[in-house]
Image (spheres, rainbow, N blue to C red):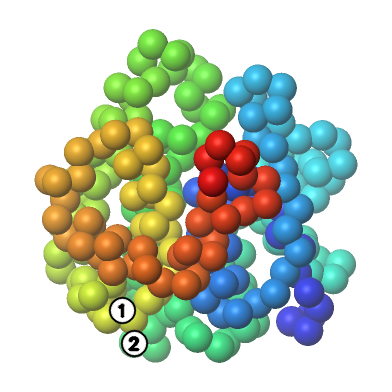
């Protein structure tokens, strides 16, 4: 299966898609890009019946390899780590491996869906949306800063890039996009700075994606 070229259904500014794009780039996996516009039809998560056959949740990313479809970013990332062992993104030490997964869950379950998912924000309303975003990013980053203070080196867990870093990069991007004051999070900011220059990060950046509007490149 790993010999077949994957197809990634993605949206250029989707944090969940970006995590997977970083993994693909880090491992040097060539893939075809299929854009899914999440803002079509207003602010609702758009997707027609054809895409929902791939992912009944109507969310990106979805990764198709051969006749198999994989959804949910963390599941996809773990699958890629197992099937494409080059440039590993999980430590061999079980304690460090658990710590990587802990960081991933804090970001992917405790921060990102609460402040970015359109299905959540629709219920918040436009007037309170920015306040809502700031609250959950700050709350999550306070916990993440403490967590990373105990396990980070150059990157989130030690001095090697891991799946945790693949999750951190898009979340910091969104914090900056929504004008969160990151000066109160020196550990997070330092790790992000170290990651920003990596080829896997720049190649997978929203501005480098084919569906990024020209005015955002």
Q: Secondary structure at mark 2?
A: loop
- Gap in angstroms between the C-alphas marked 1 and 2: 5 Å
Q: Residue at x 48, y 24 (%)?
A: 121
Q: Secondary structure at mark 1?
A: helix
Q: Is residue 59 above or below residue 148?
A: above
Where residue 150 sits: x, y (%)? 15, 68
Residue 60 in view in this figure: no
Where residue 2 sits: x, y (%)? 74, 81
**Residue 85 quadrant:** bottom right
Circle 2 is placed at which residue position? 93
- In-front residue for pair 181/131: 181
Q: Are marks 1 and 2 in contact (CB under 8 Å)?
A: yes
**Residue 91 quadrant:** bottom left
- In-front residue for pair 217/156: 217
Residue 2 in view in this figure: yes
Q: Is residue 104 above or below residue 174?
A: below
Where residue 159 sits: x, y (%)? 27, 81
**Dot 2, crowdedness within 10 Å: few (<14), some or many (≥20)?**
few
Q: Is residue 113 above or below residue 28?
A: above
Q: Quadrant of the N terminus?
A: bottom right
Q: Residue at x 31, y 79 (%)?
A: 96
Q: Residue at x 29, y 61 (%)?
A: 192
**Dot 1, crowdedness within 10 Å: few (<14), some or many (≥20)?**
some
Q: Residue at x 52, y 19 (%)?
A: 122
Mark sitting on residue 96: 1
The answer to whether residue 126 is left or right of residue 96 is right
- In-front residue for pair 163/209: 209
Where residue 9 sits: x, y (%)? 72, 53
The answer to whether residue 204 is left or right of residue 93 is right
Mark sitting on residue 10: none
């Amino acid at each position: 299966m790993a010999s077949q070229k994957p197809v990634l259904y993605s949206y250029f500014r989707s944090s969940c898609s970006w995590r997977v794009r970083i993994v693909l780039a880090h491992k040097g996996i060539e893939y075809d890009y299929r854009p899914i516009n999440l803002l079509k039809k207003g602010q609702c998560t758009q997707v027609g019946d054809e895409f929902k056959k791939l992912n009944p949740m109507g969310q990106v990313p979805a990764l198709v390899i051969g006749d198999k479809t994989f959804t949910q970013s963390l599941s996809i990332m773990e699958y890629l780590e197992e099937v494409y062992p080059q440039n590993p993104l999980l430590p061999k030490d079980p304690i460090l491996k658990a710590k990587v997964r802990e960081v991933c869950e804090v970001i992917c379950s405790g921060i990102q869906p609460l402040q970015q998912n359109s299905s959540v924000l629709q219920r918040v309303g436009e007037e309170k949306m920015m306040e809502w975003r700031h609250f959950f990013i700050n709350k999550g980053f306070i916990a993440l800063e403490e967590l990373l203070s105990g396990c980070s080196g150059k990157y989130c867990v030690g001095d090697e890039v891991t799946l945790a870093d693949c999750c951190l990069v898009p979340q910091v991007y969104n914090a900056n996009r929504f004008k969160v004051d990151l000066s109160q999070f020196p550990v997070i900011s330092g790790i992000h700075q170290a990651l920003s220059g990596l080829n896997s990060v720049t190649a997978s950046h929203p501005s480098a994606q084919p569906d990024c509007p020209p005015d955002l490149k």
